[in-house]
Image (tube, rainbow, N blue to C red):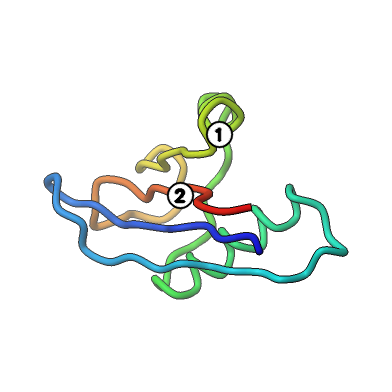
Amino acid sequence: MFRMWGKVFKDNHMLCDYVYSSDDYSISRTKKVFEGLEVICKEFDLSVPIWLDSNINDFKRVDKTRFNSDNFIDHIEFDFLEIHVIEE
């Protein structure tokens, strides 16, 4: 099972969180990550953020990254969205 945890933070407080899970072993890990991010953003009523090089490097290194206002086209009312793979 693949699980990814999405959390929204403002002023060092978690405002909301959601865990995406997938039992579909026919798709790649990368597709699961992108699908999970879309589901998490839909749950939080957010646009899907843009992956910058820093996000890709962080995610490759520790399976976790943060998306701040630079990653979103729309204005956001929080400090950052964090995603973290918690189970594979």
Instruction: Decide: is 67 above or below 59.
Output: below
Q: Nearer the viewer, residue 49 or 36?
A: 36
Instruction: Decide: is 3 above or below 81.
Output: below
Quadrant of res 5 = bottom left
- The residue drawn where x is 34% and y is 57% is 7
Is 65 left, or right, of 50 in this rendering?
Answer: left
Instruction: Decide: is 78 above or below 18.
Output: above
Q: Position of residue 72 (x, y in %)?
A: 45, 48
Q: Going from the N terminus, do you reach mark 1 or mark 2 first?
A: 1
Q: Position of residue 41 (x, y in %)?
A: 48, 65
- The residue drawn where x is 60% and y is 62% is 36
Q: Nearer the viewer, residue 37 or 51?
A: 37
Residue under numbered circle 2:
83
Task: Assess disc 2: are there few (<14), some (14-19) or many (≥20) residues with their C-alpha within 10 Å of its C-alpha.
Answer: many
**Count of numbered labels shown in the rendering:** 2
Q: Nearer the viewer, residue 32 or 73?
A: 32
Is 57 left, or right, of 1 in this rendering?
Answer: left
Identify residue type, mark 1. Phe
Mark 1 → mark 2, Cα distance in angstroms? 9 Å
Residue under numbered circle 1:
59
